[in-house]
Amino acid sequence: MANHSFEKYYLAILHGNLNTGKGESGTLDARIARKAGSLIEREINPAGQTAITHYKLIQNYADFCLVEFQLETGRTHQIRVHSKSIGHPIWGDSLYGIPSELIDHQALHAYKISFFHPTTHTKMNFYLPLPEDMKKILKNEKENYNL
């Protein structure tokens, strides 16, 4: 990841709406460190390691939004911590957000990886479809609000 030859993309359902228009993008650049007294939880901390996350709004819905994330660095819980830091935690994230009855895990999905083949130097892209439980949240919202 350091030389940007391997790219990881994620889709996440975040609480609330981003104040940007569809397709808008930005970068979250906030250092992350282990939270004092915790073996698991991380937090934004100026003394932490560099953490850079690029995002693009896919769609705002009534109470949530679908966002694509691309990691420039690979810190533990990076997307989860950055999302919480901007006031839009990931749905179903019991550590950094709010658990949900609609999904029994965080609504975060690694959906694409890209890299250059080591021999042919051809760019390779691999995709994974959105899990059914995340599709169901989006489908129900579209039906409820005629989106």
Image: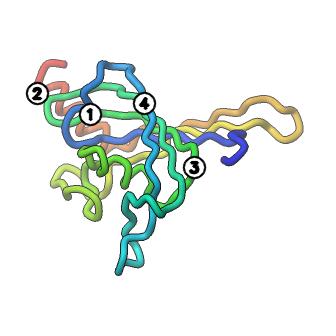
Q: Secondary structure at mark 2?
A: helix
Pointer 1 or 2: first along the chain: 1
Q: Is label 1 or label 4 in front?
A: 4
The amino acid beneath tag 1 is Cys
84 to the left or right of 123: left
Q: Is residue 75 above or below residue 72?
A: below
Q: Please tell me whether residue 138 is drawn above or below residue 29 in the rendered image.
A: above
Q: Position of residue 135 (x, y in %)?
A: 31, 37
Mark 3 residue element? loop
Which residue corresponds to the image point at 21% horizontal and 43% vertical from the top-left? 15
Q: Are marks 2 and 4 in contact (CB under 8 Å)?
A: no
Of the numbered discs 1 and 3, the one sitting upstream in the chain is 1
Q: Earlier in the sequence, mark 3 or mark 2?
A: 3
Q: Which residue is mark 2?
A: 144
Report whether 61 appears left or right of 53: left
List the residue tagged with mark 4.
26
